[in-house]
Image (cartoon, rainbow, N blue to C red):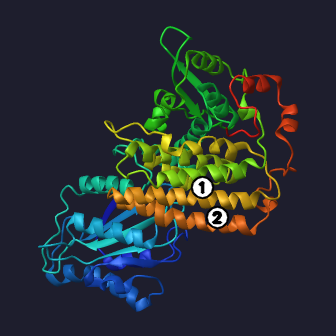
Amino acid sequence: MIAKVTSGSSGRGLIRYLFGPGQANEHTDQRVITAGLELGGEALAGGNLSSQQIADIGAGLDAAHEAFGTNPKGGHIFHLSLSLPPGAHQLSDDQWAQIAHKVVEALGLEGAGKQPAAWVAIGHGSSANGNQHIHLAASLVRVDGSRVNTWQSKQTLSRLCAEIESDYSLIVVEGRAGRGMPGLSRAELERTARERWAEPTRITLARIVREAAVASKDEAEFVRRLRGSGALVRARFETGGKDAVVGYSVALRTPEGTTPIWFGGGKLAKDLTLPHLRQFWAPSDDDRQAAVVEWSTAKAVAPGREALAGHPDDWRRAVAGVERSVERLRAVPASDLAAWRGAAREAAGVFAAWSRRLEGNSPGPLAATADALARSAQHRAGEPTPDRGAVRDFRGVAAIVAQSQLSVDSPVAWAALLNQLGRTLRTIGEAHGARGETEMAKVLVDGLSAEIAALHERFETNSIQDLAPGERTHEVRSFAAMSKNVPHQAKHQRGRGQSPGRGIGR
């Protein structure tokens, strides 16, 4: 969350601007989110205010200054805009109202033992750059004529923004601590807005890497999946040799003549460093050597199960697997952080895979859910490493979602899978709530569950051609028949450790 403060000398002028068309006609659906008691409180909340009501708000902001003549340096009007980066999941008006009240209390505009100052929070359409935001306009003169002390207000707002980012599972801005999630720099945010990208590059890459990590059975497959996603990948070898990989970097492909922006795994999230990922694969010496071979080339050396198109019936098997995992999760104590972090990590990979396949370059509710679960999966130093044991039947579901074929019956299976994933989301959210992490619980249970429910309805009411117009649908046929077209190396790789049964998620 980004806070920007300016000051001025006219409450009436500021309110006219905020309820006007804006500099680029971006102001639409202008409305009061919430307000202090001096301006009418919650009774003003909502849109459809009359011209007189709007004028009264401006006059109310100027009233104490005009009555007492108190004139703080720089002007008596405090104007704060709080905005979310492009790509962040949207907040409801009720959530923005909660945030506004936190800010007002922290800045001392009102609260126990203080004479209040007039203030109002106003929302409207996204900015020209696509940022959802609100404006908080306040008088720096209290109703008794005394001044509001704004000393260290920047530090106070920085601390508040960090708390809000954590509480509401928002993208973290660089320079503020987020559990395992590096902050976005101002340069990244500004470029995202300038280029009108759907979201910052770092967020997109984190989902791509998380999908590949969760869907893969070993490190070599992880490398191949990353390259198959279209991302640019390069290894960081141990100093002085090419026999051991100690890290990696990824970038999105860019138009010819432009330079890709590279990020190391730890710059995406702490749990996406190579040493951390290896904890989930538990690689043997043979696996490490096979991975070094894949890291050292630009093209897959020995394609594996990621080269196989899974059977359409795999979707139903995924439904059963997630259902079993949800039932196991319900018996896990909320205090078992390793189990809950592991469940969130696995579910984040599934949603990331589905988002890339269905939403593509226009991230929507699937991407937002993947990102929120990724934050839920992060652990602080000293906390136990996430454990996949509680959701062992989740293993392979991300691979199924990423690559299994579709049939005319797929929307039915999709709706059933989304239903079980929605149960997973609610169960993880309830565990957050039991631990007192109320805002994260609200994000998962209230905010995202509503978006998942809307998506579920789309799956139930649309054909596969409408839902995935760019993909072919296939008749149900045997996996053995499909594998005839798989390259020899892929079949050989499968024979080294995969079950000969049908499907890719085993």
Tell me the residue at 39%/56% (across/down): 432
- Mark 1 touching mark 2, by CB under 8 A? yes
Above or below, 16 against 221 in this view is below
Q: Quadrant of the C terminus?
A: top right
Query: Alpha-carbon neighbours of circle 2 within 10 Å: few (<14), some, or many (≥20)?
Result: some
- Residue 279 placed where, x, y %? 48, 29
Is residue 420 rendered to the left or right of residue 41? right
Could you tell me residue 456's position as x and y percent?
A: 65, 65
The structure residue drawn at horizontal position 34% and vertical position 39%, both measured from the top left corner, is 383
Q: Which labelled disc corresponds to residue 454?
A: none
Q: Residue furthest top?
A: 240
Q: What is the quadrant of residue 116 in the picture?
A: bottom left
Q: Which quadrant holds residue 107?
A: bottom left
The reply, left or right, for residue 14 in relation to residue 209 is left
Residue placed under numbered mark 2 in the picture: 455
Residue 200 can be seen in this image: no
Nearest the viewer among 402 and 50 is: 402
Q: Of 284 and 247, which appears nearest the observer?
A: 284
- Closest to the observer: 73 or 398? 398
Return the x and y of residue 99 as percentages of the image width and height: 35, 66
Q: Amino acid at mark 2?
A: Leu
The residue that mark 1 highlights is: 366
Q: Report whether residue 208 is seen.
A: yes
Q: Is residue 6 depicted above or below 216 in this figure? A: below
